[in-house]
């Protein structure tokens, strides 16, 4: 087995299942998937594409919930074991930095990064009727502060790194259009203060195998490892029956995360199970968060399935990094930090 290690905290109480005997993949599914069902709360029809973190001896999360009126909003949730969740029926009520109420018209696909003692939430937010990247923070998952939007429309899949790099906050994003975006590459921007963003670079391009031919987008907050930043991402294939979302993984340079060192030629998880292939939007695997234990290298990946359910998959950092290195294929321009 390889030598890659997670740089971070231990997390003994995270969910875990060993790889099933005879299973050939490098990422395997939780046997209790999906962990949420249709109509999970009275006012919501589906909860998926959500972010969870260790919190107060248990776990907390920011959940994407599509309401009974069809609109996506963000809800807080809590769990003792990160498998069974109590998710609020009411939406997160933001206050802006002046203490005034703030509520975007829609909000979806949250990621949560802990930096110091603050949890930063990055999501796709409604901005003048268009999708852009929203930023907020909380310390207790009860009081939420909305900060200035990170960018002008159109952009989605904003993902903040869990620490400053060379003194700067770093964020991945995926410029988009106003609709279902038939293109998309991953870019990175840096900021001294989470307000002003610049020094934009292109990180990774779509293309290569058909599974990631149409567009790609960053998934969970990158995991710091001894081999670089481990990034799970989604790749999209345009079929005659619509978009298919699969999961891949990449390793970015630890000091210059605009530089891709390795990325998987093949998907590491693709819709196969009924709960991934049948739902509100069929054939979607959309990773948004991980829990991980630096002592054992265990990683639990939280992904949305079919825009309907929250699911978990597992991997081990040393096995996965070995796999990524042995099965890597960069796209033209990937390693060149495109300006
Ligand atoms: C993307 C986002 C995701 C969604 C996916 C599949 O554009 O809207 O929230 O999971 O489409 O519908």
Image (cartoon, rainbow, N blue to C red):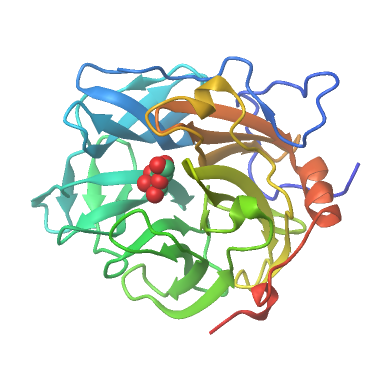
At 46% from the left edge and 73% from the top edge, which residue is drawn? 189
> Is 183 drawn above or below residue 308 in the view shown?
below
Q: Position of residue 97 (x, y in %)?
A: 18, 58
What is the residue that sits farthest to the right in this orientation?
1
Asked whether residue 231 appears in the rendered view, the answer is no
Q: Position of residue 237 (x, y in %)?
A: 55, 50
Q: Between 293 and 186, which is closer to the camera in this rendering? A: 186
Asked whether residue 130 appears in the rendered view, the answer is yes
What is the residue that sits farthest to the front in this orientation?
240
> Is 335 drawn above or below residue 74 in the view shown?
below
Quadrant where the N terminus is found in the figure: top right
What is the residue that sits farthest to the bottom in this orientation?
339
Instruction: Say whether residue 316 is left or right of residue 118.
Output: right
Instruction: Say whether residue 184 is left or right of residue 131.
Output: right
Quadrant containing ligand 1 = top left
Q: Position of residue 289 (x, y in %)?
A: 51, 41
Q: Between 43 and 118, which is closer to the camera in this rendering? A: 43
- Total labels: the figure holds 0
Instruction: Say whether residue 329 is left or right of residue 180.
Output: right
At 46% from the left edge and 56% from the top edge, which residue is drawn? 159
Q: Between 182 and 144, which is closer to the camera in this rendering? A: 182
At 33% from the left edge and 26% from the top edge, which residue is drawn? 46
Instruction: Say whether residue 223 is left or right of residue 187.
Output: right
Q: Position of residue 21 (x, y in %)?
A: 84, 18
> Is 37 drawn above or below residue 298 in the view shown?
above
> Is 36 drawn above or below residue 263 in the view shown?
above
At 19% from the left edge and 26% from the top edge, which residue is drawn? 68
């Amino acid at each position: 087995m390889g030598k890659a290690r997670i740089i971070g905290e231990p997390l003994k109480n995270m969910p875990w299942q060993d790889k099933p005997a005879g299973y050939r993949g490098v990422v395997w599914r939780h046997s209790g998937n999906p962990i949420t069902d249709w109509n999970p709360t009275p006012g919501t029809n589906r909860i998926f594409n959500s972010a969870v973190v260790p919190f107060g001896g248990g776990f907390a999360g920011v959940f994407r919930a599509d309401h009974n009126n069809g609109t996506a909003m963000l809800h807080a949730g809590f769990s003792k074991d990160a498998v069974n969740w109590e998710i609020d029926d009411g939406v997160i009520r933001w206050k802006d930095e002046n203490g005034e109420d703030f509520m975007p018209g829609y909000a979806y696909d949250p990621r949560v990064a802990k930096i110091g003692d603050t949890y930063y939430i990055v999501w796709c937010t409604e901005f003048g009727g268009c999708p852009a990247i929203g930023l907020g923070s909380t310390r207790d998952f009860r009081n939420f502060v909305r900060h200035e939007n990170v960018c002008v429309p159109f952009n989605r899949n904003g993902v903040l790194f869990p620490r400053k790099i060379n003194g700067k906050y770093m964020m991945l994003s995926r410029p988009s259009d106003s609709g279902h975006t038939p293109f998309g590459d991953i870019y990175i921007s840096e900021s001294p203060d989470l307000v002003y963003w610049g020094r934009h670079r292109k990180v990774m391009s779509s293309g290569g195998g058909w599974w990631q031919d149409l567009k790609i987008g960053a998934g969970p907050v990158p995991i710091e490892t001894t081999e670089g930043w481990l990034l799970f991402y989604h790749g999209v294939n345009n079929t005659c029956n619509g978009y298919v979302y699969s999961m891949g993984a990449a390793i970015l340079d630890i000091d210059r995360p605009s530089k891709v060192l390795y990325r998987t030629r093949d998907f590491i998880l693709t819709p196969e199970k009924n709960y991934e292939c049948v739902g509100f939007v069929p054939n979607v695997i959309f990773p948004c968060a991980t829990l991980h234990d630096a002592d054992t290298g265990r990683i639990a990946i939280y992904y949305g399935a079919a825009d309907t359910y929250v699911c978990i998959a597992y991997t081990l950092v040393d096995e996965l990094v070995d796999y990524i290195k042995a099965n890597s294929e960069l796209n033209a321009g990937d390693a060149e930090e495109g300006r």
